[in-house]
Structures are given as structure tokens and as C-alpha cells.
Image (tube, helix red, strand yellow):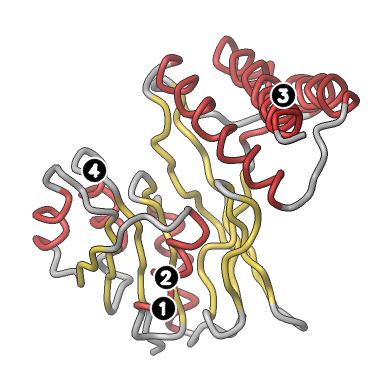
């Protein structure tokens, strides 16, 4: 049977880390937690599970995850955030692939997110397909901070697994807005560094498209009030990202 490393990045995750670790303990041959100098009980909880605990000041979301990949001992890696849990169906799907020695280079899976206590099953947030189980020799994290994605090598072979990652995200609207404000600032800085422009069209048209796509075409309305809130906040995030980029570039002139 193949061997598997599970890598998790953390910062003050004492409320969520235990559930994450419980969901992978039967799959993992090693668990590596890369922690950004937490001040709560994150390290204590991690060590209860016999993990290898690595302290690393935060490098950026993409950079921190690539650093975590480098700490793994085995080539097949499952990369998770501390607020993510594998449901039982996904655990079984991964175990079946492990017993077959992981014949594919990478494995995708759906992620469902909890919003103020409700699991979201439609709209822009579902199915939120993620590539999280992969051969690290043929994959690495890229994208634009704070949103990472896997960069695949040429000829990459993938399989989609049954089951979901359960993402315990926002407990309140207030927490959601606070994160949006933080993330859009990071996004604007990253886009500016890449030379992208905050054009007038992106500032106004892209948010409208984001709302209509998520709420109407992807069925966000089927999730009731949370679905409406998510569609509006996705549009707001798009607007805020380009507004901050436009203002940042104006101040640099």
C-alpha cells in the first residue's frame, strides 16, 4: 500500500484543528502541521495526535503551503486547511485509492462550506472543486494570494473522488465581511504586483456578472437567505478587489 503525508497550515486554530486531525488520522502515515506562531493551544492539540509540528512565520498563503509541501516525507500529499474536515465518504474514497497505490497524479473533490450554521449546496460556493490530494513531484501551489490553486505538470492525470471536504468557514456575517476586507486588500496588492489594471469595466461589470452567475445561473437562490447573502458578498468582493486596485494604482502615479 502507498504511503501518504497530510500537511496542514495553522494559525490559532484551537477550535477547529482537532476535528480536522480526527478526519485524517486513519489515512495518514504522517501528519505535518506548519504553524504561523500561534498564541493559543494549537500546538498542544496538534501534538496530542503525534504530528510533526513546524513553526514558520507566515510567508503568504501560497508560499506557506509550498513550504508545507517541502516538509513532507512522502511524495503523495493531502493538503488541508485547519478548518476543513473529510466526510466519511471522502475518507473511504481516498483509502480506496491508497490501497491501489494512488494510480493518478492528483485527485479532485468537492468542498462544501458552512455559512452561519447552514451547509451551502448551490451558487458560487458549490461544488467548490479542489485538487488537494496529489503527487508533490508533479504539483505545486500557485495562483494569486490569498487564493491558491495547484499548478499541474504536463500530462497530469486526475480523478474526481466521491465525498466532500466540509469547510467550517463563517460563523457570522460580521466575520465574513471582516475576512473579505482583509482578503481584498491582499488580492489588490497581488494583482498590482502582477501588472493587472483596475479598469472601470472591471469595477462595475464584473461584480454584476458575479452576482447573476452565482445567484441565478448556479442556483444560489435555492439556499435561501444565506444564498442571497453569499451572492451579494461575492459581487462585493469583486468590486472591492478592483476598487482597491484602482486606488492603489492611482496613489502610485
With 3 as the anchor, is 148 left or right in this view?
right
**Disc 2 vs disc 1: Cβ atoms closer than 8 Å?**
yes
Q: Which residue is mark 2?
A: 67
Element marked by disc 2:
helix
Check the picture and name the quadrant holding the N terminus. bottom left
**Disc 3 vs disc 1: Cβ atoms closer than 8 Å?**
no
Q: Which residue is mark 3?
A: 243
Picture layout, residue 80 above or below residue 200 = below
Residue 123 visible to an observer of this rendering: no
Check the picture and name the quadrant holding the C terminus. top right
Given this view, does label 3 or label 4 mark the residue nearer the observer? 3
Separation (CA) of disc 2 from disc 1:
5 Å
**Disc 4 vs disc 2: Cβ atoms closer than 8 Å?**
no
**Residue ID at (78%, 49%):** 195
With 200 as the anchor, is 69 left or right in this view?
left
Separation (CA) of disc 3 from disc 2:
31 Å
Q: Position of residue 152 (x, y in %)?
A: 68, 73
Going from N to C along the chain, the mark reached first, 4 or 2, is: 4
Separation (CA) of disc 4 from disc 2:
19 Å
With 78 as the anchor, is 198 left or right in this view?
right
Amino acid at each position: 500500500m502507498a504511503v501518504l503525508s497530510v500537511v496542514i497550515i495553522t494559525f490559532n486554530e484551537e477550535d477547529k484543528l482537532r476535528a480536522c486531525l480526527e478526519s485524517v488520522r486513519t489515512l495518514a502515515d504522517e501528519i505535518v502541521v506548519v504553524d504561523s506562531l500561534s498564541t493559543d493551544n494549537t500546538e498542544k492539540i496538534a501534538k496530542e495526535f503525534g504530528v510533526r509540528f513546524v513553526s514558520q512565520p507566515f510567508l503568504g498563503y501560497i508560499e506557506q503551503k509550498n513550504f508545507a509541501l517541502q516538509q513532507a516525507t512522502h511524495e503523495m500529499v493531502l493538503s488541508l486547511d485547519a478548518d476543513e474536515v473529510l466526510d466519511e465518504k471522502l475518507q473511504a474514497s481516498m483509502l480506496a485509492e491508497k490501497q491501489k497505490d494512488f494510480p493518478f497524479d492528483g485527485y479532485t473533490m468537492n468542498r462544501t462550506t458552512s455559512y452561519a450554521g447552514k451547509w451551502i449546496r448551490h451558487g458560487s460556493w458549490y461544488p467548490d472543486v479542489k485538487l488537494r490530494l496529489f503527487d508533490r513531484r508533479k504539483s505545486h501551489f500557485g495562483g494569486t494570494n490569498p487564493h491558491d490553486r495547484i499548478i499541474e505538470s504536463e500530462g497530469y492525470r486526475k480523478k474526481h473522488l466521491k465525498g466532500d471536504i466540509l469547510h467550517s468557514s463563517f460563523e457570522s456575517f460580521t466575520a465574513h465581511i471582516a475576512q473579505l476586507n482583509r482578503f481584498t486588500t491582499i488580492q489588490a496588492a497581488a494583482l498590482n504586483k502582477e501588472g493587472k489594471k483596475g479598469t472601470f469595466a472591471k469595477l462595475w461589470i464584473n461584480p454584476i456578472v458575479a452576482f447573476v452567475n452565482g445567484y441565478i445561473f448556479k442556483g444560489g437562490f435555492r439556499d435561501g437567505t444565506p444564498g442571497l447573502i453569499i451572492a451579494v458578498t461575492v459581487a462585493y468582493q469583486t468590486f472591492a478587489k478592483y476598487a482597491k486596485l484602482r486606488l492603489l494604482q492611482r496613489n502610485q502615479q
